Amino acid sequence: MERFTISLDDDLARQFDQLIARRGYSNRSEAVRDLLRGQLEQEHQARDDSGYCVASLSYVYNHHERELAERLTEIQHRSHDLTVSTLHAHLDHENCLETVLLKGPAKAVRAFAEAMMAERGVRHGQINLISVDMDQGRHSHAYHVRGKGEPHVHLKPKS
C-alpha cells in the first residue's frame, strides 16, 4: 500500500469530514479511496466502450405525451438482450419515473440509453454504467447454459 499526504484548507477539511460522517466512513483514507475509484471508473467509462457493463438508466417522462410509453416499451423490446428489468413509478398526474437495469457491451448499453433519453417527452435522463469483467469462475467460458437451458453470464466488478 502506498501512502501520500494532501493539504486541505480548514473549510474543505470540515466539509469532507461531514461528508465522511454522513456516508458512514470510518476514516478519511477509505473515503478518499472511494472517491478516487469513482473518478477513475467515470474516466474509464467516458473513453472506453469496448468492454462489458451493467447499468442503471433513469428518466422522467410525461405519460400524456402521445404514444411515448409505447415507444419506450418498443425500444426496450428491441433491446431485450440488454434490458434486465424496468421499474415504473407514478410521480404525479402527468409524470412517471422509470429505471431500467441493463447489462451488455458498454457501446450497446450507451446507445440504448441515448435512444431512450432522446425520445420526445423524456426528460431528466441519466445513466450510471459500471464496468465488469466476465468472470470465468469454474466454467471454461463466460457464457454458458445452465442445466435447464437458460443462458447466462458470470460478472465481476472491474478492480
Image (tube, helix red, strand yellow):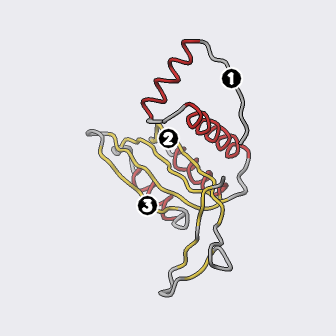
Alpha-carbon span between mark 3 and mark 2: 17 Å
User: Quick one: SS at disc 1?
Assistant: loop
Q: Which residue is mark 1?
A: 6
**Local crowd size for mark 1, using a 10 Å CA cut-off: few (<14), some (14–19), many (≥20):** few
Alpha-carbon span between mark 1 and mark 2: 36 Å
- Report the residue at 62% width, 38% height from top: 33
Q: Position of residue 15 (x, y in %)?
A: 50, 19
Q: Which residue is mark 2?
A: 125
Between tags 3 and 1, which lies in front?
1
Tell me where residue 65 sits by quadrant: top left
Residue closest to the far top? 10
Q: Which residue is mark 3?
A: 85
Q: Is residue 65 left or right of residue 19?
A: left
Foreground residue among 155 and 98: 155
Count of numbered badges drawn on the protein:
3
Residue type, mark 3 in image: Ser
Residue type, mark 1 in image: Ile
Q: Position of residue 2 (x, y in %)?
A: 73, 38
User: Quick one: SS at disc 2?
Assistant: strand
Between tags 3 and 2, which lies in front?
3
Foreground residue among 33 and 148: 33
Which badge, 3 or 1, is on the more N-terminal residue?
Answer: 1
Foreground residue among 89 and 121: 89
**Local crowd size for mark 2, using a 10 Å CA cut-off: few (<14), some (14–19), many (≥20):** some
Foreground residue among 19 and 47: 19
- Report the residue at 69% width, 42% height from top: 46
Alpha-carbon span between mark 3 and mark 1: 43 Å
